[in-house]
């Protein structure tokens, strides 16, 4: 069995995500059926692109229900960029489209007072309770954001771009990052490695 199962979201950055795990010596496979998501030890949900097209792809493939059940059970899952946003109920980007609804609330657009999209490095500051996320700089490419707080039990790290927003959050073996850890140099590589080692 592979170390990680990567769930394609239609426009996922599969090449860079696969390369990140290969550099750490982790084997990977690409999900073809929902049953694989249900049984995999570790699942990665990357994403680049629009909220509606990504969730639509997951629903057409039958992946959405399997991911929702997996996340609700707290099984080892790593969501990246749009993958993080899909965990919420919806997004301003696609007002009529439902997300996975694992977390309450809606994703909102970054304010017009700053450059949108945010492209580049930004400081990530973990709050109390984070065990995987450490302080450092990560590479972001986003026009939309989640904002704190989250329900009890979730540990949050924030960044600031026109105001504080959620850079990442974690609970048990579930980790979600708005930034791209696979593009975040040694700091991002260390974060992926910690998740691999501690998620089970």
Image (tube, grey):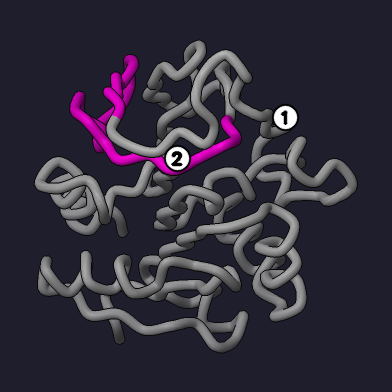
- Residue 137, position in %: x, y? 22, 30
Kindly identify which numbered label has been placed on residue 23: none
> Which residue has dot 1 on it?
105
Q: Secondary structure at mark 1?
A: loop
- Residue 166, position in %: x, y? 48, 26
Crowding at dot 1, Cα within 10 Å, few <14 / some 14-19 / many 20+, comes out as: some
Q: Which residues are magenta?
A: 122-145
Q: Which residue is at the front of the view, 21 or 16? A: 16
Which residue is found at the position 57% from the left and 37% from the top?
143
Q: Secondary structure at mark 2?
A: loop
Which residue is found at the position 42% from the left and 66% from the top?
13
> Which residue has dot 2 on it?
178
Q: Residue furthest right?
A: 96
Crowding at dot 2, Cα within 10 Å, few <14 / some 14-19 / many 20+, comes out as: many
Q: Is residue 92 left or right of residue 19?
A: right
Q: Is residue 24 above or below residue 123?
A: below
Q: Is residue 51 left or right of residue 182?
A: right
Q: Is residue 113 above or below residue 90?
A: above
Q: Quadrant of residue 120?
A: top left
Q: Is residue 171 above or below residue 34?
A: above
Q: Quadrant of residue 178?
A: top left
Tell which circle, 2 or 1, labels the residue nearer the N-terminal end. 1
Q: Which residue is at the front of the view, 157 or 47? A: 47
The quadrant in which the N terminus is found is: bottom left
The quadrant in which the C terminus is found is: bottom left
Q: Is residue 22 left or right of residue 122?
A: left
Which residue is found at the position 43% from the left and 43% from the top?
141
Magenta region includes residue 195: no
């Amino acid at each position: 069995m592979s170390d990680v199962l990567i769930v394609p979201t239609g426009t996922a950055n599969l090449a860079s995500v696969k390369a990140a795990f290969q550099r750490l010596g982790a084997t990977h496979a690409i999900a073809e059926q929902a049953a694989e998501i249900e049984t995999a030890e570790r699942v990665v949900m990357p994403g680049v692109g629009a909220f509606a097209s990504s969730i639509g792809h997951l629903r057409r493939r039958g992946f959405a229900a399997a991911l929702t059940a997996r996340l609700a059970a707290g099984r080892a899952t790593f969501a990246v960029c749009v993958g993080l946003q899909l965990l919420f109920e919806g997004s301003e980007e696609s007002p009529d489209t439902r997300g996975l609804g694992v977390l309450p609330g809606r994703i909102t657009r970054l304010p017009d007072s700053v450059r949108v999209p945010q492209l580049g490095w930004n400081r990530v500051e973990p709050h109390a309770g984070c065990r995987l996320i450490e302080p450092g700089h990560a590479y972001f490419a986003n026009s939309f954001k989640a904002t704190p707080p989250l329900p009890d039990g979730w540990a949050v790290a924030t960044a600031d771009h026109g105001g504080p927003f959620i850079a990442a959050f974690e609970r048990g073996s579930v980790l979600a990052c708005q930034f791209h850890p696979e593009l975040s140099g040694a700091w991002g590589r260390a974060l992926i490695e910690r998740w691999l080692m501690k998620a089970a």
